[in-house]
Image (cartoon, rainbow, N blue to C red):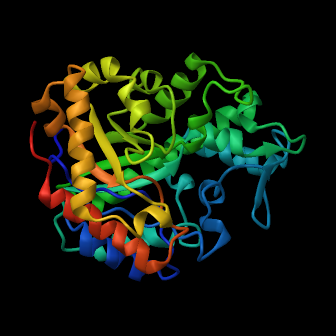
C-alpha cells in the first residue's frame, strides 16, 4: 500500500455544529484525503470518550461523565454483547447518527467522488481504558473483564468504520487512526501499565483492520514503543514536540525503511500560535526539522516519500474561522512540499 507523499490529513475534531457544513469544509481543502468530523460542540455524545460507548454493556452517561457498572451488570446488556461478539455481528458495533453525525454526513457527500484516501478515527484503548472508570473509580483497563470488552469493542468499531468508508470510496486507501493523547503520559507514576501491555492492547485493535492503521499522540512519548506495534502511520506534534521525535531517530529509520509513514503535525492547533503562522514560515520549520532527521541518518528520499502533513491536534477548541485557517494551511503546505537538503 502506498500513499501520495505529503498528502494532507486531519485530526477528527472540529468546532462546527452542522455535520454537513463541517464535511463540506473538509472536502474543500482535502478532496483527495477527507476524514469524518467529530463535533463535540454539537452533542455530548460526540465527546472523545462518549462517542464510542454505544453498544458497550454497563455503560452509564451522567452529563459529560462516562462510567461503567460492575462487569456483567446489567445482565441483559452483557448477554447481548456476548452474542454479538461470538457470532461476529459487526453491526452491533455501529456508530449511530446521534454519536457520529459527521461520519454519516461525510458518507453522503463522498458519493460520486474518488478520493485517494479516506480517514476515520477512534479513541484508542489506552486513552479510553484509563479515561473511563467503573463504579469504584478504577480505570476499566485495570479490570480484566471490562478490558476485554473494551478491546473487542474498539477493534470492532474501527473495522466497522473501515468497511463503511470502503463502501462509498472503494478505490481509496482507508486509514483509521487510534487517538491516544494519554500515551503522552507514558512512564509517569500515574500510568501503571508496562510497555508490553500497551503494545499488546494496540496490536489487538490494529489487527482488526484490513487497511492502514495510524496513531495520534499529541505530546512527548516513547516512540520506540509505538514503532514496535503494527501501526503504519505515526502522527506527532511536530510544531512543539519535534525534539522528542528526533531523540528516536535511530528507531524511526527502520520504521520508515519498512514502509512506515510519518504524519507531521506541523500546523499548530493552539489559537495563539495559529493566528500568527503562515504557510511560508511553517514550511521553513518543516524543512529544517526534516534536515535534522536526515543528519541523524534517515535517508532523505525515504523521509520525503513517507511523510504526510497535518495539524498538531484536534481543532474543536478554535473558532470556525481559525479551524478553517488550519485546514487551509495544511493544504497549502501539501501543495508547496519541502525542498530537499
Q: Quadrant of residue 208?
A: top left
Q: Residue at x 17, y 55 (%)?
A: 171
Tell me the quarter of the image containing the N terminus: top left
Q: Is residue 296 left or right of residue 138?
A: left
| Position in image of residue 285 (x %, y %) | 27, 48
Q: Quadrant of residue 216?
A: top left
| Position in image of residue 163 (x %, y %) | 36, 53
Q: Residue at x 34, y 19 (%)?
A: 251
Residue situated in front as seen by the camera: 207 or 66: 66
Residue situated in front as seen by the camera: 8 or 280: 280
Tell me if I can see residue 169 in this picture.
no
Q: Is residue 187 above or below residue 163?
A: above
Residue situated in front as seen by the camera: 126 or 153: 126
Q: Residue at x 27, y 72 (%)?
A: 27
Tell me if I can see residue 201 in this picture.
yes
Q: Residue at x 22, y 50 (%)?
A: 284
Residue situated in front as seen by the camera: 27 or 154: 27
| Position in image of residue 265 (x %, y %) | 36, 49
| Position in image of residue 291 (x %, y %) | 20, 34
Amino acid at each position: 500500500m502506498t500513499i501520495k507523499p505529503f498528502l494532507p490529513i486531519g485530526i477528527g475534531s472540529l468546532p462546527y455544529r452542522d455535520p454537513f457544513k463541517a464535511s463540506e469544509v473538509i472536502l474543500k481543502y482535502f478532496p483527495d484525503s477527507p476524514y469524518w468530523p467529530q463535533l463535540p460542540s454539537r452533542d455530548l455524545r460526540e465527546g472523545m470518550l462518549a462517542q464510542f460507548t454505544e453498544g458497550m454493556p454497563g455503560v452509564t452517561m451522567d452529563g459529560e461523565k462516562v462510567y461503567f457498572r460492575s462487569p456483567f451488570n446489567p445482565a441483559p446488556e452483557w448477554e447481548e454483547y456476548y452474542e454479538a461478539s461470538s457470532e461476529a455481528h459487526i453491526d452491533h458495533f455501529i456508530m449511530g447518527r446521534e454519536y457520529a453525525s459527521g461520519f454519516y454526513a461525510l458518507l453522503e457527500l463522498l458519493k460520486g467522488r474518488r478520493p485517494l484516501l479516506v480517514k476515520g478515527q477512534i479513541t484508542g484503548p489506552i486513552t479510553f481504558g484509563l479515561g473511563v472508570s467503573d463504579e469504584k473509580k478504577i480505570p476499566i483497563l485495570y479490570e480484566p473483564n471490562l478490558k476485554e470488552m473494551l478491546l473487542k469493542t474498539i477493534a470492532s468499531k474501527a473495522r466497522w468504520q473501515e468497511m463503511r468508508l470502503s463502501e462509498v470510496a472503494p478505490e481509496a486507501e482507508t486509514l483509521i487512526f487510534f487517538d491516544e493523547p494519554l500515551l503522552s503520559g507514558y512512564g509517569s507514576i500515574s500510568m501503571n501499565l508496562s510497555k508490553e501491555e500497551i503494545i499488546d492492547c494496540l496490536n489487538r485493535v490494529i489487527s482488526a483492520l484490513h487497511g492502514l492503521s495510524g496513531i495520534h499522540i499529541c505530546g512527548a512519548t516513547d516512540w520506540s514503543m509505538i514503532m514496535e506495534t503494527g501501526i503504519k502511520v505515526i502522527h506527532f506534534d511536530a510544531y512543539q514536540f519535534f525534539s522528542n521525535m528526533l531523540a528516536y531517530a535511530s528507531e524511526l529509520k527502520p520504521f520508515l525503511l519498512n514502509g512506515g509513514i510519518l504524519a507531521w503535525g506541523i500546523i499548530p492547533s493552539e489559537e495563539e500560535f495559529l493566528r500568527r503562522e503562515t504557510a511560508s514560515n511553517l514550511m521553513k520549520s518543516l524543512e529544517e526539522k526534516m534536515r535534522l532527521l536526515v543528519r541523524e541518518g534517515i535517508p532523505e528520499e525515504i523521509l520525503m516519500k513517507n511523510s504526510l502533513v497535518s495539524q498538531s491536534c484536534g481543532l474543536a477548541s478554535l473558532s470556525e474561522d481559525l479551524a478553517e485557517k488550519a485546514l487551509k494551511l495544511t493544504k497549502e503546505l501539501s501543495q508547496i512540499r519541502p525542498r530537499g537538503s
